[in-house]
Image (cartoon, rainbow, N blue to C red):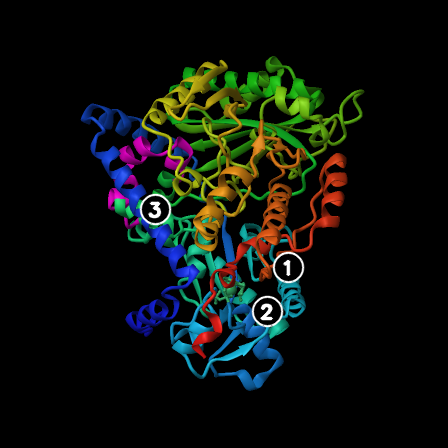
Amino acid sequence: MDGVDKEKVQRVVYEMSKGSKYFENEERKEAFIRQKIEHMRARAAKIPAADLSHYQKVVDKRILELEATRELSRIWLHVDMDAFYAAVETLSNPLLKGKPMAVGGMSMISTANYEARKFGVRAAMPGFIARKLCPELIFVPTDFEKYTHYSNLTRKVFQNYDPNFMAASLDEAYLDITEVCKERGISGAEIAEELRSRVHEETGLTCSAGVAPNRLLAKVCSDINKPNGQFVLPNDRMAVMTFISSLPIRKIGGIGKVTENILRGVLGINTCEEMLRKGSFLCALFSHSTADFFLSVGLGLGGTDTPEARFRKSISSERTFSATQDTALLYQKLADIAEMLSADMQKEGLCGRTLTLKLKTASFEVRTRAVTLQKYICSSDDILKYASRLLKAELPISLRLIGLRVSHFNEDKVGVPVDPTQKTLTTFLISGDASTKIVDDQSSFGSDLSNLHFRNDRETVFSVDIHETCHYEFGDPFKSNPLQDVDDNNCISSENAWEMEQIHELSSNKTEAMVKTADGVVHTLKPSNGVLWVSEEDSSVQKEPEDSNPDRLNKEASTLGNEEFFLSNHIEQLYWVNDYRCSLCGAELPSSFVEERQEHSDFHLAERLQKEESGADSRAMMPRQRIVPQDHVVNQRRRKKHKSSPRQGRHLPIDSFFVKSNQNF
Ligand code: DCP
Ligand code: MG
């Protein structure tokens, strides 16, 4: 915060905490990071020039592929309440207004109002240090019922702008405002203004908002004009690249202190743009998912899909490639996609009668063309026949992506599950990853049975953007933590570039193979639907649950003692065996059940922390209801009985490491 005397704050924190267990732990962690940086630096220095130029080629290719996935047609809004707990407490007690106050106690505070922040008081700081920094500081105990009440009021407002908004915590949410902007013919900035004033009317609280083409950027933007402000990043590639060029990496959700230190210490990377310049080293030193995440950050890419109801209404497949206008090549790609889609449909016993062609032109314009047929189709010949007609009408054209979707299923067909997401886990394994197929419930197509009905939409109607060669979605708070290998000392060594190449190779050859990476893990690579499914055979290697909070490990690292951290991370860390079974309790959850997985891993985390901690604070999140398979609902109910506060692990139980506490008063 501007105006904070940082040196004074550092000095006070140092003096107050010196000698405590917390302090010792911090020192151990720093020593460990320093050692790790040295080790990685030495490895970086030894990479032969020839290897680096090879990695550069791999990176250049990957950047093109990632660039082709850029989606600029959605408008995302991230909203974050200002000093949430403190503001709620001030509402109930107006005498607190204008005075420095913190919510929490002597051992730890949850947040502080902006008056207190001027003194360097901040969330997760022990209260006795906060009081030293600001002797006038008023402490108010936490009251989660109140925060939940106000959170619910804000959510009622969000609902009006995006009924499927994603709540990221009690005071944060992501809204896809594309449709509301279109319907009302107003800009994202205007929606943000309106939403903020409605939140204020309903609650008496202020919030800040960020508007951007994807969630990753929207979150960064909501922080820029805090408190009670907003920042809009236009849906324009140049604007995004300019914005990202000087953005410090730490501003990105998912890049915490440890990652920041490593990237800075090893490769001198400070800004997001530098990720691209150091791409060959990133590729050489990190696993392909981590390198991909870094590269996508350098390009300002982030999540744009809207995970909606889980009942499958459509199935699709798409491929990204370097832009081409070679007609023969385009037809060949179309044939490949038709074949993959048909195979996937047949595996699931699906037949549909609306076929949609999605095209992304060389200039990133997205077009969709759809046809509703009189008969249900599922063979590759049929799909190709109608898809070719749709494509023909667009020629000549230069494209970088083709996608096909089939919807309007014949659900009465014998043996076809009404909800195909309820298929057995064996089917999940055999068919690869359910998440690689696009699950869509936006099948608002014409239902005219009598005519062959063509539609021309100049909009993106595919709800999930997938990549040809990679099943990760990068840097998204709702998805995986691609930084696992940064923060847990498991960096895959330089062979991973080779692994990356293998993956690319495989996805085009449609074969299946085993790849052994330098860390000795055998990965089975299965191309499915144009996306590779990677399953780790060696269960001793930890894989971050797909859904965990991106910054959790950073938080854990700064929360737990080193021993605890490694214990948690290497022994008790939850991961998904064969990508669907929980390594800790055997519960089965396919990877497409992102929020359920999040909840599940949080349950284990809470369970573990309950054992480790005496008293923990909570930043409880109200998980939103999803339609899930029956067996999952049963498991979930069973689990919920035990679950007291699923998010207890999100914030720092610093107090358990402070033994000095009251002696300073
Ligand atoms: N919180 C917590 N422990 C933390 C961080 C936050 O208990 N380490 C709680 C208190 C916050 C609420 O979560 O009020 C929301 O967190 P934010 O990070 O959004 O912080 P604030 O809303 O307090 O402030 P800001 O204005 O910076 O968003
Ligand atoms: Mg907030």
Asked whether residue 23 appears in the rendered view, the answer is yes
- Residue density around tag 3, few if under 14, some if 14–19, many if 20 or more, within 10 Å: some
Q: Quadrant of the N terminus?
A: bottom left
In the picture as drawn, the residue positioned furthest to the bottom comes out as 95
Mark 1 vs 2, N-terminal side: 1
- Asked whether 419 or 46 is in front, the reply is 46
Residue 309 coordinates in the image, percent (x, y): 67, 42
- Asked whether 379 or 5 is in front, the reply is 5
Residue 433 coordinates in the image, percent (x, y): 58, 27
Task: Tell me the amino acid under the disc marked 3.
Answer: Phe
Instruction: Identify the residue position indicated by label 1 in the image.
Output: 160
Task: Tell me the amino acid under the disc marked 1.
Answer: Asn
Asked if the residue under mark 2 is in contact with the one under mark 1, i.e. CB atoms within 8 Å, the reply is yes
Asked if the residue under mark 2 is in contact with the one under mark 3, i.e. CB atoms within 8 Å, the reply is no
Residue 298 lies in magenta, yes or no? no
- Residue density around tag 2, few if under 14, some if 14–19, many if 20 or more, within 10 Å: some
> How far apart, in angstroms, are the residues tagged by discs 3 and 2?
48 Å
Q: Which mark is residue 32?
A: 3
Mark 3 vs 1, N-terminal side: 3
Q: Which mark is residue 198?
A: 2
Q: Quadrant of the C terminus?
A: bottom left
Q: Secondary structure at mark 2?
A: helix
Image: magenta residue range? 266-293
Residue 639 coordinates in the image, percent (x, y): 72, 45
Q: Secondary structure at mark 3?
A: helix
Q: Secondary structure at mark 1?
A: loop
